[in-house]
Amino acid sequence: MTTAGLVVIGDEILSGKVADANSPFLIAELRSLGVSLREIAVIPDALDEIADVVRRQADRYDHVFTSGGIGPTHDDVTMEGVARAFGTRVERHPELTAMVRAHYERRGLPVPERSLRLADIPVGATLLYSEQIVWPVVAMRNVYILPGIPEIFQRKFLAIRERFRSVPFHLRQVLVRDEESIIAPHLDAVAGGFPDVALGSYPRWTPAEDGHRVKLTLEGKEPARVEQAFQELVRLLGSDCIVRQE
Amino acid sequence: MTTAGLVVIGDEILSGKVADANSPFLIAELRSLGVSLREIAVIPDALDEIADVVRRQADRYDHVFTSGGIGPTHDDVTMEGVARAFGTRVERHPELTAMVRAHYERRGLPVPERSLRLADIPVGATLLYSEQIVWPVVAMRNVYILPGIPEIFQRKFLAIRERFRSVPFHLRQVLVRDEESIIAPHLDAVAGGFPDVALGSYPRWTPAEDGHRVKLTLEGKEPARVEQAFQELVRLLGSDCIVRQE
């Protein structure tokens, strides 16, 4: 199964100044691509922490995405952090330097020295171009470095999304009347019998209008196995307990 | 400065079945209490991962909150995970066992064997009672174990929130017209001169209606220092650049 991790870098998220819009977006995108997101880490704009988390996630997951901490100011240290995660440093990239200069020169403006920081990327990083984006995505091994501004994060991810497409997930759901303690032994049986099918159990605080108290989900990559688990679960629960199947 | 970490445990969040409502709630609560949230980890219902992340956060931060993975089903392994983080195991707590039994007996119902799992907590954990909640909050050292259902997460946190109150944050903001590359040297000067004041710089994708492109925030625990940094920043930026001060 293809796996992924997400590192959200931003004091502004942790301090509540800005809501994290990139996690919900990426969660939905990865799901629809058939990629299993295994971890989200929201951390400050701090070099050591970025390096630690990126190193750990890059070792564990097929793909890692970072959000934020890219730009010309003192707190933009994601590029250095990713470089450090791989035991290297940043260097000014000639192609990106030319792009930054051209951006200002087209408008007849002087090039601010600090904007050239946007051309500093980890040694060994690659640039991913696409027709949909002006600036390439910077990738270091399996780490894709994306900006924090949601409009740009989304645009850049969408420009490279097809390279992550995997086998889709197959999902079935059963909504049940009984509380979790009553049905738990049946869930154990199905979870034990179908280790390749993820069984989720999501209780509500109060029963829904249709009377269901718990939503059960079965999910996996093999439709036939999910269907088998679904049939077994439905059989064990019994029709009195089931409000709806989906 | 009082610090905190948050561990959100839930396959349902990572797979996009349920939106994470507890992080935004806790971010706002901790901020208003003057507690600095340093990390959010969203991880699966997996014993080893829970133990690893809880151990790491409990070592690093003053307070750690966990959300989710509490209940009677196969995927509820947070209690075991927290126990393992501290090198111990869970055991059935007599007081909680009596409460679970009473809950069913009051309604004249048999006690489902599996619901007694709700009384299994780490050896050495303490129970925090409050007038606002029926069930106590389980705390293991500096780790507060909260359920994932948002209504209960919120109710339980609010019942114990006053014990986390710290010195409040003091915040000033400046909205500026110029892009980050232009003002970056001024930001460096203020960030360098006031290491005890956090300076944030948040660019927009397109300029706002009032013309501002970047929001600058100054935040700290000492109002006088924040005000000094604010005056210095305003002086360096100059009135042409500033759209609004807050």
Image: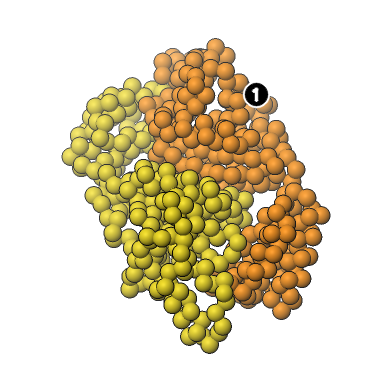
Chain colours: A orange, B yellow
Position of A10 with respect to A221 (left or right) is left
Determine whether A61 is above or below B49 in the image: above
Q: Residue at x 46, y 37 (%)?
A: A9
Please state, as top left, top right, bottom left or bottom right, where the C terminus of chain A lies in the image.
bottom right
Residue A148, percent from left and from top? 50, 36
Q: Nearer the viewer, residue A65 or B183?
A: A65
Give amino acid for label 1: Tyr
Drawn side of residue B139 relative to residue A6, left or right: left
Q: Quadrant of the N terminus of chain A?
A: top right
Q: Residue at x 27, y 55 (%)?
A: B165
Establish if A83 lies above or below A185. above
Q: Nearer the viewer, residue A37 or A76?
A: A37
Q: Quick one: SS at disc 1?
A: loop
For label 1, the residue is A129
Mark 1: give few (<14), some (14-19) or many (20+) Cα within 10 Å.
some
**Residue B21 in sight from this viewpoint:** no
Can residue B117 be seen here? The reply is yes
Quarter occupied by residue A195: bottom right
Q: Position of residue A187 (x, y in %)?
A: 66, 65
Side of A182 where B160 appears, left or right? left
Looking at the picture, how far across and down is residue B68, in whole percent?
50, 58
Residue farthest along the bottom direction in this orientation: B108
Image location (x, y in percent) of residue B1: 27, 44
* Residue under the point 35% across and 63% down: B126
- The relative height of residue A141 versus residue A49 in the rendered view (above or below) is above
Quarter of the figure with residue A210:
bottom right
**Image mark 1: chain:** A
